[in-house]
Amino acid sequence: MNIQRKELLVTSFALFSLFFGAGNLLLPPLLGYNAGENWLWVTIGFMITAVVIPIIGILAHARLQGTLFDFGKKVSPVFSLIYCIIIYIIAVAIPSPRTAAATHEIAIHPAFGTSPLLTSAIYFSLVLIFVLNRSKILNVIGKFLTPFIVIMLLAVIGIGLSSSTFTTGVSQFETPIVTGILEGYQTFDAIGAVVVGAVIIISLKFKNMKVSAFESKRKLIRQSGFIAGTGLFIIYAGLISVGAYYGSEIEVNSELSSDMQRANLLRGISIASLGEFGNTVLSILISLACFTTAIGIVAGTADYFKGLLNDSQTVYILTAIIACVLGVVVGQLDFNSIIMVAVPVLLCVYPITIILILLNVLPERLATPFVFRVVVFITFLFSIPDVVGFISPSEGLKTFTAFIPFAKHSLGWVLPALLAFIVTSLLQSKSTTAKA
């Protein structure tokens, strides 16, 4: 049961890096900037969906020690199969290309003026090389890339806060906590938890670690999850606070697209913290953060389809190639366009993912297949108005959703899911008592 410190640190760093990508770096500073005096409340909301839920997802992986399929199989095998395919398609079609788009717009194009096609082609060629060398992922990311990312992030945050005047602007948010929760969706971290958690599980099988026993592996994954979560918390809170405190010092042009606002603010903070060298640091930081996340997404997707089709290595290679080609194609879009495509998808899939994560960490007597089926169905049902409202808002829909608590904040599924869980748990308990 003894877990060597080196193994724990490597796994923790790898997990942190697989989480920390384009959105994780670009979203928090502008969120803090717009939150102004309410940055702490926004931070609390952001942490719920960008740290707490994802780390619970890792704990669920530690408990299941299977694949993403195991997360939904209590609903039904057919549901879980469809859910897995949708999740992996979303992963390779949105967050993975988004990492390439962010790298191009912020790190590569300003320095070299190259086309998005060239950047994406080189970027995903390198991703493919790492993914095909599957057994080295944990070592390379955990030992080398992540420590460098963390050191640079802490330097920007630490120097930035120490040189700040600690003045904030007026908040632009009516409900800061809710805004933080919804902005946390954009990090894709809950989906990332169920995808990269599986990558960690399989990577541990590849590595010659002293964690072959189920309990030892569970302990390693749980401890790594808590360490990675603590790291994410510190970095997110730091980036949000720096964005808030630099609100009066850096001009963010409101006429620019939101992605350019994010990029310009982060660049301004880096330069203010580290001088002109900050531009170089920012470029390297974004490139590495995005790159490690893309590796995790593509490897996770290839792992799943490999397992689905008789553990075929050929399927693994073909899936990785297709995912990288798709990344090159979609990577031609700008960062903000990819986010706008992502929002309606997230409003539907994210609630189901959150529910599956929460149910999978509960004891089996509380989270029976019956409970899974009812709660997931109710969650899906009440997330539909959020999706329809984003795509095609109408007065009739607003009248209907006015009767659903939190619906105006795109969280209309929360209370119905909670009530469904309570009612089904009580019914399950009565049924068990009657049989006894």
Image (cartoon, rainbow, N blue to C red):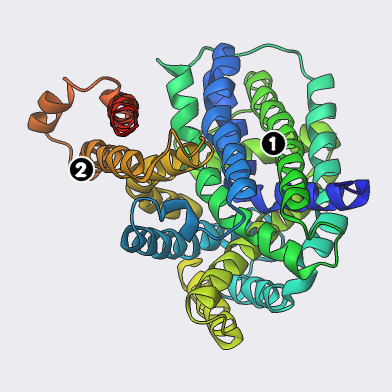
Q: Secondary structure at mark 1?
A: helix
Callout 2: 10 Å neighbours few (<14), some, many (20+)? some
Q: Is residue 377 above or below residue 399?
A: below
Q: Which residue is at 80% across, 70% downward?
A: 136
Callout 1: 10 Å neighbours few (<14), some, many (20+)? many
Pick whichever, 436 or 108, lies toward us: 436
Q: In which quarter of the view is residue 300 placed?
A: bottom right
Label 2, on which residue?
388
The x, y position of residue 424, in whole percent, is 29, 31
The x, y position of residue 221, in whole percent, is 72, 47
Q: Which residue is at 44% across, 55% downward?
A: 338
Does the CB distance between marks 2 and 1 fall below 8 Å? Answer: no
Q: Is residue 123 above or below residue 426?
A: below
Label 1, on which residue?
229
Tell which residue pokes out farthest to the left in this image.
Answer: 396
Pick whichever, 273 or 12, lies toward us: 12
Residue 263 visible in this rendered orientation of the protein: no
Q: In which quarter of the view is residue 162 placed?
A: top right
Looking at the rendering, in which quadrant would you find the C terminus?
Answer: top left
Q: Which residue is at 50% across, 27% downward?
A: 180
Say left or right for 82 vs 30. Answer: left
Say left or right for 245 vs 366. Answer: right
Three-letter amino acid code at the position of disc 2: Val
Q: Is residue 248 above or below residue 271?
A: above
Marks 2/1: CA–CA distance:
33 Å
The x, y position of residue 427, in whole percent, is 27, 28
The x, y position of residue 231, in whole percent, is 75, 36
Pick whichever, 196 or 270, lies toward us: 196
Three-letter amino acid code at the position of disc 1: Gly
